[in-house]
Image (tube, rainbow, N blue to C red):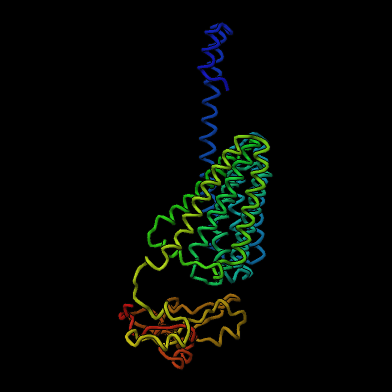
Amino acid sequence: MVDEKQIKQWLKDKTINRAQAKKMLADSNHKGSEEKSNKLISVVTIIGAVLIFIGFAWLIAKNWHYIPNAVKVLILVGATLAAFVLGVMLRQNDHEGVGRSLITLGALLFILSLFLISQIYHLATSIQHYAWLLFFAWVIILVTAYLLDSPENLVVSLLTFFPWVILQYFSSASHAEEGIIFGFVLIFLSAGALLFRLSALHNSLGHTFTNIYRFWTVFYFLAIFYLLSFQSFLPVISEYSFEGGAFSAFLVVFIIICFLGFIAGALFATSKSSISLKEILGFVGVLAVLFILILSTKAGAGSMGDCNAKNCDYDFKTTQECNSAPAGLQCQPGICEDVNCWNIRNESGCNSQQICQWNQNKCSNLQCYAFKTESECSSEASCQWSQNRCSNRYRCNDFKTDSTCQNNGCNWNSDYCMSTNRDQHLIT
């Protein structure tokens, strides 16, 4: 768009006359105000799309248990497809802001649909299952971002990518504690390197997604510096071993893929522009310095740290360790836990548990507060009527022995170390 300064210069050079300059200034101002108005409409419609998404999710959640499974799936899939189709149609009819907002709404509904359909059919039962859902979500939304030229969907995809990589790493690390922080630092470092190359690649192609990738590159590197800013994290970072469980197969493959992508993007970008070579060399220098600083934490291993009280619940993982714990801690192996009624799939198995009830073809934990009369309350052995209300007669963690725990319909977990005196700890 021609600006006022350029028009005045043309008038000064006598390229145009005063009447033409006046007309061009009027047209320029009108077009500028129109663009500002369109930007405001886009912002308002995006906010509206998010609010519609929240309202839709709340409405579905409120009536979820009363809707048949097949209808639930149809509602979720239909709403997602409708948002995408309407968004594309509106953009084709020059309603850019509203169309982009609906496409973003479609991406958010797609994520919601994945998790709700998984919940309907009880598919997600572990961290790995949730990681697969997030992986499927960010990949599909990334595809829609490029196919529909939607920068908003790219942002949603990158936002989903972050929790996916964290969950996937947790799932693959086999509950390892040693080196887990160091693993996070490597993930942020690798992801930052890949995103930097993607930003340079898009820049060399003149793509509109360049600034989005630049922002997320900065985000991942700021996340590294944020982790390194905690003094208490430095000794934790140094406690890594390349043979430890924190260096999972996922972490190794993720690092390799990120740096292969970095190299491929670097080769392509340098073939397009000589400036990219300088950027790459500067970035490699920053990476080298960061990696040396991270590895240097190993030099101070064992010389820094905190002295904490030992605790039965966290420091002793097996029955043997629990029995050999210092006497002052008063540790006892085993803990009494609630039965997870939601995992029981048949009515007979549900009714065999004292604290479970079968309702609407589902097994759920018995909620004594749902009984409003004394007769209803008294009909359940695990409930008691007191002060004109029904409440649970006991909590499973009140039982301290295997026999009393199981006799009252609870589960005894022998792989847990429990303190019989919660107020006493031993300083070591």
Quadrant of res 244: bottom right
Q: Position of residue 191 (x, y in %)?
A: 57, 53
Left or right position of 37 against 145: left
Left or right position of 127 against 388: right
Q: Is residue 99 above or below residue 244?
A: above
Q: Nearer the viewer, residue 196 or 21?
A: 196
Q: Nearer the viewer, residue 57 or 428?
A: 428
Quadrant of res 390: bottom left
Q: Count the marks.
A: 0
Residue located 41% across and 80% down the image:
373
Quadrant of res 126: bottom right
Residue located 54% across and 14% down the image:
7
Q: Nearer the viewer, residue 61 or 41?
A: 41
Q: Quadrant of the N terminus?
A: top right
Residue located 57% across and 38% down the image:
278
In the displayed image of the protein, which residue is found farthest to the bottom?
Answer: 403
Would residue 372 be visible to someone looking at this image?
Answer: no
In the displayed image of the protein, which residue is found farthest to the front?
Answer: 299
Q: Nearer the viewer, residue 343 or 359?
A: 343
Q: Position of residue 196 (x, y in %)?
A: 57, 45
Would residue 307 be visible to someone looking at this image?
Answer: yes
Q: Position of residue 385 (x, y in %)?
A: 38, 83
Q: Is residue 398 above or below residue 231?
A: below
Q: Quadrant of the C terminus?
A: bottom left
Q: Position of residue 264 (x, y in %)?
A: 67, 47
